[in-house]
């Protein structure tokens, strides 16, 4: 195909799929473009605010504002501790959000505005006239605000991809495109910052507040305006039954996540590798303190270093398809160790004119490798959330951030290491005074070449240790792309039968899920074919076909395992226990469950299926223990059933109220444009009433949520048994599903 034909084909596809996604995909080109170009605005905000977040190596707070590492570590601890309750609130808000606009999209606006205002306020505070204590207090106060608003905003944007598509490969492709486009903003900022700094201050330094006061506020405002594209032109899609309702409390969601082994593996990698980024300051230090190049040259250095993150975005989809995420993570992290270690002789040669270019070369390769690994993180986190929904039946994305607070505790325990390394290697007030400086800014020590080399070398070695620890957990990550596809198909089938049982089945859902079942029936009994070494193009094409068929076989077996699970001895036993629990009722189910913890621990765990059943048995016992405790506390006279249909009424009222508020705001805008003061006054009064009504509905939803959560915890074993019985009954109607499919397919065609 010629270049012209390829271009025409691409334009034709762009037009055809601009508003409607291709078959097998979930995102239209319009959504992908809006997510990517809107991301430029988001990343402008992230670029600015991330430099205001308290961290021991933060140059804006440390070098520019002038807070030394020891004081910085103290306010860092306080800032992290303040984030605990704020993150819990954020998690609960996300998981219990039920808005026509989605789970994450609304927060791009409601959290974006205060984030921009806080960022502008932070940079314009008069730090020059403040004492060290006042500086610390002001920086801490703003960071407490950032802990909630900025983290909420950033998490909403990063997590949005998790609910825009359940297709792991599509998510990886979109993430690659998004990363290419959105990274223009930090690249532009980093390239022009040294040149703008020279124009603003007349010096070759980046440690002057004037620079940030001139540049950051416009970047924040423009960034927010561009980011609105994401809010306006994307639509969330969660694989879940239409009638499914989730309203759970923090503790319930926390207990659900405990079972997610992949969450702990990925989290552990981050917690162990806390020192890996220690070397990141060295390149900037070499320019600012050792004057290794001019401002123009440093702009080029930053441009080249920043460009390293661009290229992995182009090759990542290919590598993911060919090797899978696990192999890429392990390979890139091992390679990363070597390139960090290469920086050690370079730092020791500081003073030579070419050294910054050698350091740049090493940094470029390091950033390339690291970016390739980091590009996988959002896709991996999305897969982990799919797994969570697969094993528990609940989509509790927000709670992952709350459980991640454990990492903050670990960070507090390990956070003293870097300040201690700084102190030990000479970055302290005593050394500054001994070198003839006034001691007001301990970073002046870095002007001394010997101390610069000593401190830089320590940071490189610390980074090597961090990189080694970081790679270890990835060896235990075994969630393959094929298994993720299979899990999503199982989720679609579960949703199909749940909606069928509730008489709310839609034709498009029916057609897709029924075709998945028929494909699984076709492939489940086939045996995987061997892959032979390719000898020519035909052999390569045949191997590709075999791989695709083998993947279908693996997926089909997991799908049929789900559909036939009640035909196995284990499934029959599970069904029989569910029947006994159902007959015992809400206030008698506990006496029916005979399984002991010793019996559960003694269950076989050779295969993945056996491990899953053993985990499920242990979790049932944990649920039973929590249920007994909840009954004793809240239902001493017996469990009173909670009617969850109240949520349907409340949610309908919430949606109607939200729609009326939206209409009233639009009418108010028009009245102001017409300068109709009387109509504007009436609309303001109506808005006040609507907001009072909204507050009342919110209170009622909160009360119902608390009541439902108590009932949920006290009766969970009984409810799980009821779900099992209902699912079993629904699964018996497969032939009815196929009959409905044939009719729906005929209508669709």
Image (spheres, rainbow, N blue to C red):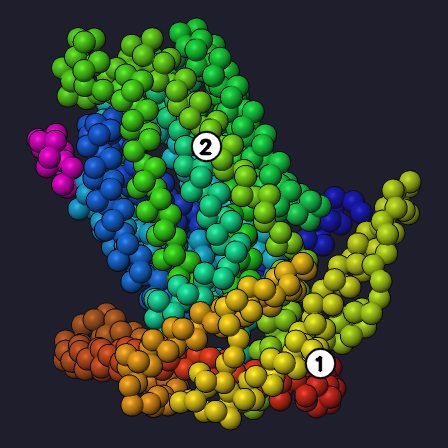
Q: Which residue is mark 2?
A: 466
- Does residue 127 appear in the picture of this structure? yes
Q: Residue at position x 60%, y 86% from top?
A: 576
Which circle marks residue 567 in the picture? 1
Q: Main secondary structure of the magenta part?
A: helix
Of mark 1 and mark 2, the one earlier in the sequence is 2
- The answer to whether residue 182 shows anywhere in this view is no
Residue 425 is one of the magenta-drawn residues:
no
Please identify the residue farthest to the front as the structure is shown: 598
Q: Say above or below: 41 vs 616.
A: above
Tell me what residue is drawn at x 88 percent, y 42 percent. 534
Q: State yes or no: discs 1 and 2 in contact (Cβ < 8 Å).
A: no
| 692 relative position to 578: left or right | left
Q: Secondary structure at mark 1?
A: helix
Image: 670 above or below 287:
below
Circle 2 packing at 10 Å, graded few (<14), some (14-19), many (20+), is many
| Rendered location of residue 60, percent (x, y) | 27, 32
The quadrant in which residue 159 appears is bottom left
Is 222 above or below relative to 196?
below
On the image, the x and y values in percent for residue 674 come to 22, 73
Give the magenta part as a residue range: 120-138
Q: Position of residue 32 (x, y in %)?
A: 54, 56
Looking at the image, residue 497 lies above or below residue 416: below
SS for dot 2: helix
Seen in the image, is 578 located left or right of residue 608? left
Please tell me in which quadrant of the rendered image residue 111 appears: bottom left
Residue 320 x/y as whole percent? 65, 47
In depth, the one of 613 and 522 nearer the eye is 613
- Measured Cα–Cα span from mark 1 to mark 2: 49 Å
In magenta stretch: residue 134: yes
């Amino acid at each position: 195909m010629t270049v012209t034909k390829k271009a025409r084909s691409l334009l034709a596809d762009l037009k055809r799929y601009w508003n409607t996604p291709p078959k097998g995909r979930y995102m239209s080109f319009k959504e992908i473009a809006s997510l990517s170009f809107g991301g430029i605005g988001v990343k402008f905000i992230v670029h600015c605010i991330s430099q205001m977040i308290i961290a021991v190596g933060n140059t804006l707070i440390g070098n520019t504002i002038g807070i030394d590492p020891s004081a910085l570590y103290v306010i860092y601890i306080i800032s992290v501790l303040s984030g605990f309750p704020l993150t819990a609130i954020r998690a609960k808000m996300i998981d219990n959000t039920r808005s026509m606009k989605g789970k994450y999209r609304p927060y791009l606006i409601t959290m974006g505005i205060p984030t921009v205002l806080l960022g502008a306020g932070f940079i314009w505070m008069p730090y020059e006239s403040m004492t060290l204590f006042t500086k610390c207090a002001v920086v801490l106060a703003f960071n407490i605000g950032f802990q909630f608003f900025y983290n909420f905003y950033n998490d909403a944007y990063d997590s949005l991809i998790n609910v825009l598509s359940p297709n792991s490969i599509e998510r990886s492709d979109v993430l690659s495109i998004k990363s290419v486009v959105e990274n223009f903003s930090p690249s532009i900022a980093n390239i022009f910052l040294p040149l703008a700094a020279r124009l603003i201050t007349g010096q070759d330094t980046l440690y002057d507040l004037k620079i940030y006061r001139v540049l950051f506020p416009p970047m924040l405002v423009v960034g927010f305006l561009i980011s609105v594209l994401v809010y306006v032109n994307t639509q969330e899609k969660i694989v879940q039954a239409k009638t499914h309702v989730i309203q759970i409390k923090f503790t319930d969601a926390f207990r659900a996540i405990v079972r997610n082994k992949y969450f702990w593996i990925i989290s552990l990698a981050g917690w162990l590798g806390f020192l890996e980024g220690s070397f990141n300051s060295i390149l900037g230090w070499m320019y600012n303190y050792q004057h290794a190049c001019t401002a123009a040259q440093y702009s080029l250095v930053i441009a080249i270093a920043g460009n390293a993150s661009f290229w992995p975005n182009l090759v990542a989809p290919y590598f993911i398809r060919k090797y899978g995420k696990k192999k890429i993570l392990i390979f890139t992290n091992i390679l990363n160790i070597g390139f960090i270690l290469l920086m050690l002789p370079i730092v020791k040669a500081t003073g030579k004119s070419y050294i910054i270019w050698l350091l740049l070369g090493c940094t470029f390769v390091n950033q390339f490798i690291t970016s390739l690994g980091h590009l996988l993180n959002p896709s991996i986190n999305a897969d982990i959330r799919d797994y969570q929904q697969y094993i528990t039946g609940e989509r509790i994305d927000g709670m992952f951030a709350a459980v991640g607070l454990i990492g903050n505790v670990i960070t507090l325990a390990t956070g003293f290491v870097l300040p201690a390394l700084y102190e030990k290697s000479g970055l302290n007030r005593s050394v500054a005074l001994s070198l003839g400086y006034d001691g007001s800014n301990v970073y002046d020590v870095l002007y001394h070449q010997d101390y610069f080399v000593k401190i830089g070398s320590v940071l490189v070695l610390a980074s090597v240790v961090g990189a080694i620890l970081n790679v270890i957990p990835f060896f235990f990550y075994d969630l393959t792309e094929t298994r993720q596809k299979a899990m999503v198909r199982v989720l679609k089938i579960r949703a199909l039968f749940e909606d069928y049982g509730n008489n709310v089945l839609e034709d498009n859902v029916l057609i897709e899920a029924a075709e998945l079942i028929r494909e699984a029936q076709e492939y489940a009994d086939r045996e995987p074919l061997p892959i032979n070494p390719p000898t020519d193009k035909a052999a390569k094409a045949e191997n590709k076909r075999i791989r695709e068929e083998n993947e279908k076989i693996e997926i089909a077996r997991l799908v049929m395992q789900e559909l036939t699970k009640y035909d196995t001895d284990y499934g029959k036993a599970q069904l029989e226990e569910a029947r006994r629990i159902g007959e015992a009722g809400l206030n008698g189910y506990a006496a029916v469950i005979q399984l002991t913890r010793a019996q559960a621990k003694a269950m076989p765990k050779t295969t993945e299926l056996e491990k899953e059943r053993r985990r499920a048995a242990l979790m049932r016992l944990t649920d039973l223990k929590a249920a007994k405790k909840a009954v004793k506390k809240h239902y001493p006279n017996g469990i009173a059933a909670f009617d969850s249909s109240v949520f349907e009424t409340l949610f309908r009222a919430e949606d109607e109220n939200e729609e009326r508020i939206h209409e009233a705001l639009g009418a108010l805008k028009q009245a102001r444009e017409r300068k109709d003061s009387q109509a504007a006054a009436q609309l303001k009064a109506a808005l006040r009433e609507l907001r009072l009504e909204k507050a009342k509905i919110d209170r009622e939803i909160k009360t119902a949520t608390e009541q439902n959560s108590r009932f949920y915890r006290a009766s969970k074993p009984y409810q799980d048994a009821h779900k099992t019985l209902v699912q079993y009954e629904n699964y018996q109607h497969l032939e009815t599903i196929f009959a409905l499919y044939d009719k729906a397919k005929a209508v669709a065609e």
